[in-house]
Amino acid sequence: YADVPATSEWLTVPECAHLQPTLYPDRPYWGKHLRAINEQAWVYERVFTVPDVPYRRARLRFEGVDYFASVRVNGQFAGQHEGHFAPFTLDVTRLLHPGENTLTVRVTSPWDAPNPHGTYPTDHVIRGLVKGLYEHGEGVVPPDVNPIGIWRPVWLLLDDGLSIDHVRIRTALDGRVDLRFTLANATSETWHGSLDLRAFAAADADDAVHSPRDIRLSPGVHQIEQTLHLREPRLWWPWDQGEPHLYQLEATLADADGAAASTVRETFGVRTVRLERSSERFTYVVNERPIFIRGTSYMPSLYLSQVDRDTLARDVAFTRAAHLNLLRVHVHVSPPELYDLCDHAGLLVWQDFELNWVQDTSAAFEARAQALLGDMIDQLGNHPSVITWACHNEPTKVFARRQNVEHRPDPALYRQAVRQDTTRPVFICSGQLEGDWRCAGDVHT
């Protein structure tokens, strides 16, 4: 915070949005005035009042900050985060006091330094952020655009110290549903209660599967696995193959008296996917039925904060009207509403990770990229519409510079994705065929 001059003028930001369209609504795409935004840190400050209710734990949840965030509460450091798409939560229990409190967030999204050895538009910089198209996207994103800001809501969460932090859902065609829960007990005592599960078809809540389970949670973070069996499962299909049937999972941590300590709800579909790949065949097989893919790359806006659910729903409808069955979410993670819409519309999703062209090859950058890849798979892994992960877009565009795909970070990212999600095809990169791609014809996905 020391690099912010004491004389800096405070501006009122009317909503969660990127700074460029907020500060320059008539000139958000080109100009030196945009580049200057990213040459300094921006500090957000908000005074808030803690509700007068009993609680044992207080957390701040940020749905989206682009790109680096450093958070303080009442002047005390609370935590930091990297990455524009992944929500993050900070425990601030000991930093709050009754009445008014001050939240301060320092945000940066720096430019990469020029690469003096660059010979091609894709390597005029060595990209050091995990930001995909939104970091020197060039042909798609104007060179003056580098989105920055708190672009999604921030929440104050008060609870009794118990929470279901994540649930991973994996399905089989016979109705088997394998669940893995991440549970947290932030108190100092062992908690006794139950994990109550209820799964039902979204169109028929009365026909539900119930599964209560007694559990004991010592202080700390725990993972618990559970399996459900759906009766006569209704499969999720791409829209041109059948109905995209969806299910709801409700999971509740309840104490001995039945009072809920934490509840989560997840939408999922019963769906399998695999890839048949040979020298003569490249075919996705969904629910053991070969699917002819008809897709398009997709990027909803130069600033994701300018996209709302209605805009995304319009784009999904246009995609289906064009008789396409797949969106390739091109080198970025879109707002979560898109994936929910694709689930309901029966629209397949090829999901790119946020690495584009030539990236940093250091071990430190590899570790940062791995952390965000894990966040992406956790965040999107329950969506039946998502059928593929791709770890890097066109890292070999410059043939003599293959360090990313052959050294770092791509091999480690590929191994991680395959290990973290065994249910989907994974590509180490896109825009690449084995051997000399210059003689391979059209190699785009």
Image (cartoon, rainbow, N blue to C red):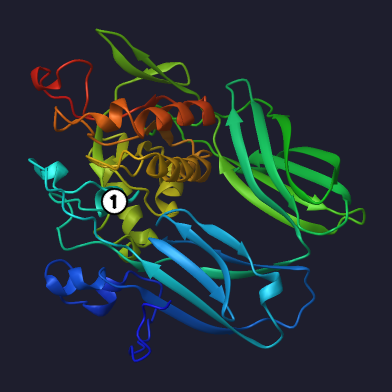
User: At numbered mark 1, what does the secondary structure look like: helix, strand or loop?
Assistant: helix
- State whether residue 89 is above or below residue 42: above
Classify residue 387 by image quadrant: top left
Disc 1 marks which residue? Answer: 315
Residue 169 in the image: state x and y as whole percent: 60, 35
Quarter occupied by the C terminus: top left
Q: Is residue 323 visible?
A: no
Q: Nearer the viewer, residue 220 or 147?
A: 220
The residue under the point 29% across, 28% down is 405
Classify residue 396 by image quadrant: top left
- State whether residue 371 is above or below residue 8: above
- State whether residue 309 is above or below residue 237: below
The crowding category of the residue bearing disc 1, from other C-alpha atoms within 10 Å (few below 14, some 14 to 19, many at least 20), is: some
Residue 147 in the image: state x and y as whole percent: 29, 63
Q: Is residue 249 left or right of residue 159?
A: left
The residue under the point 30% across, 38% down is 328
Q: Is residue 146 left or right of residue 116?
A: right
Q: Is residue 221 visible?
A: yes
- In the image, farthest residue toward the right: 256
Classify residue 391 by image quadrant: top left
The residue under the point 37% across, 48% down is 333
Residue 343 in the image: state x and y as whole percent: 45, 42
Quarter occupied by the N terminus: bottom left
